[in-house]
Amino acid sequence: MRPPRIGFTLVAVLIAICLLGAPVPARSAATNPFSLATGGQATLDAYIEARMRVARIPGLALGVVRGDRIIYLNGYGVAGPDGRAVTPQTPFILGSTSKSITALAVMQLVEAGTIDLDAPVTTYLPWFRTADETASARITVRNLLYQNSGLPVDIGRAGLAEDDQSDMALENGVRGLAGAQLSHPPGQTYEYANENYTTLGLIVQAVSGRSYEEYIQSAIFAPLQMRHSAASISHPATSDLATGHRYWLGWPVPFTAPYPRQSAPAGFLISSAEDMSQYLIAQLNGGAFKDSHVLSPAGVTTLHTGGARVSATSSYAMGWLVSSQRGTVRLEHSGDVSNFHSNLLLLPDERLGIVVLVNANGVSSAAALDILIEGVAAIVRGQDLSEHVDPPADRLRPLLPLAPLLILVVWIVGSYLVTRRSQRCSKLPSRGVQRLWRSGVPLGINLGLATLPWLIVPRLLHSPIATIRLFAPDLFLGIALLSVLGLAWAVARTILTISVRYARAGGVRQPS
């Protein structure tokens, strides 16, 4: 008997669809107070549009600054299903690039004398604790900023599916750490955890006497003239918020995600390419933008100085990853929520800053989205584009969530053929070990394929299943189908095996 062809047909159709091209993204009018080098704008636009086709990006906003000037602003593609164009003023949810803004707020309060970087968190939040109260009492504000508090990455991803909009959301999130087990002693090892920065946001709130959102709006966004930025989803500036998208097997689908207010300091601030360009100018100019100063030059230097080693060539500063490439210092950070992506890059030695905002995200598309800012940097610096920053499309990567299903299909087809052969020949496995080997082991494999992914995948991704469902819906669907098919085949194969047993017991040969 030939195996069913429907599974192979579906896979072939999916591959064919993924190999089709995407429409050319529309481009909004560029804003260029100070021009790039001759030909630079056209090269930049061509590169962005090509990469948007490759990664199927619905909308993107770009800002480039040099020194104290914005040298390029542009919007590409669409901001939502209504077809409105992305502009430099279109707001996007930032993701973890929000962390440097929270760090700036903390440093402002340090310079005001109301926060001590080396004071324990309990100085400002007396009730703060984790499962090990003694160890958590040693966590300092600096540890939170450097991501070496000992809080594990898993705990930082647990609240991303929440949608609590109450005024107590931030405090409730931090109080939820009472049962968290520290991965390392405070101050010892870098481990990226969102809850470090949600805790910092609550400290800002406790020390300033204002809500975190009010503080960010008045102390950072207002002086930097970030008029299209917001620290909460209910702020009027979000009325023109771009529509986020999640990738399903490489295709962006509009998606309105939960907005966890408790995670705003770590990843849910909202801003535009124009506003973030003004923010980068302040970062490059000792805290100054035009006539406003949001921090002293010494404070900015502290923000940009690595404090926790990440690798042999990089360290984590305060909301920035600091590294050196061929003698050039880089400060960068990426940002991801389920339906938006962002990148920030500072090259202080060249007085250059770049921001890229995208209204789509997906686990399998992460590399294609991160490459964009590297290509922009190469063009602005007058370098040739290499395959590293302009690779060909990888159409098979989005299909990776289907790989476990393919394994299951092969297993089902193979075991079905073996069972049917036994059924035709009325071969019942011998009693004892052989029966266990031929009947019990396949049943165990079926049940394992159906249940183990729910245990293994969250551990591998350091995320609860609710977060995986939010950030990687195609992977979650694959796991769910794996379970359904695995359990269904476990039942079906058991029935087939029993039918062989009865056939042999009755001396009846099954028809082929």
Image (cartoon, grey):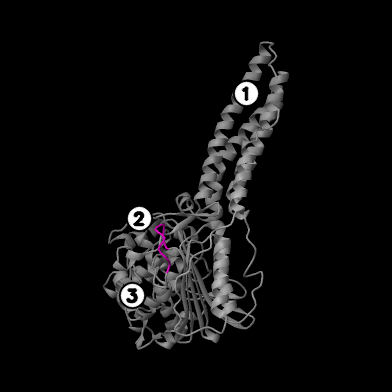
Residue at 34%, 71% (x, y): give it.
203
Task: Return the mark for residue 320.
Answer: none
- Residue that label 2 marks: 163
- Residue that label 3 marks: 227
Q: Nearer the viewer, mark 3 or mark 2?
A: 3
- Residue that label 1 marks: 496
Viewer-proximal residue, 369 or 110? 369
How many marks are shown on the rendered structure?
3
> Residue 383 falls in which quadrant of the image?
bottom right
Q: Position of residue 248 (x, y in %)?
A: 52, 51
- Identify which amino acid the numbered label 2 is placed on: Asp
Region of the chain picked out in magenta, as a range: 79-86
Instruction: Point out the tag, 3 or 2, that comes first from the N-terminus.
Output: 2
Q: CA distance from mark 1 to mark 2?
A: 47 Å
Neighbours of disc 3 within 10 Å: few (<14), some (14-19), many (20+) = some
Q: Is residue 385 at all visible to an observer of this figure?
A: yes
Q: Position of residue 452 (x, y in %)?
A: 56, 43
Viewer-proximal residue, 477 or 467? 477
Q: Position of residue 381 (x, y in %)?
A: 59, 82
Is-magenta flag for residue 480?
Answer: no
> Residue 325 falls in which quadrant of the image?
bottom right
Secondary structure category for the residue under label 3? loop
Vertical comparison of 502 with 67: above or below: above
Is the stretch drawn in magenta largely helix, strand or loop? loop
Q: CA distance from mark 3 to mark 2?
A: 25 Å
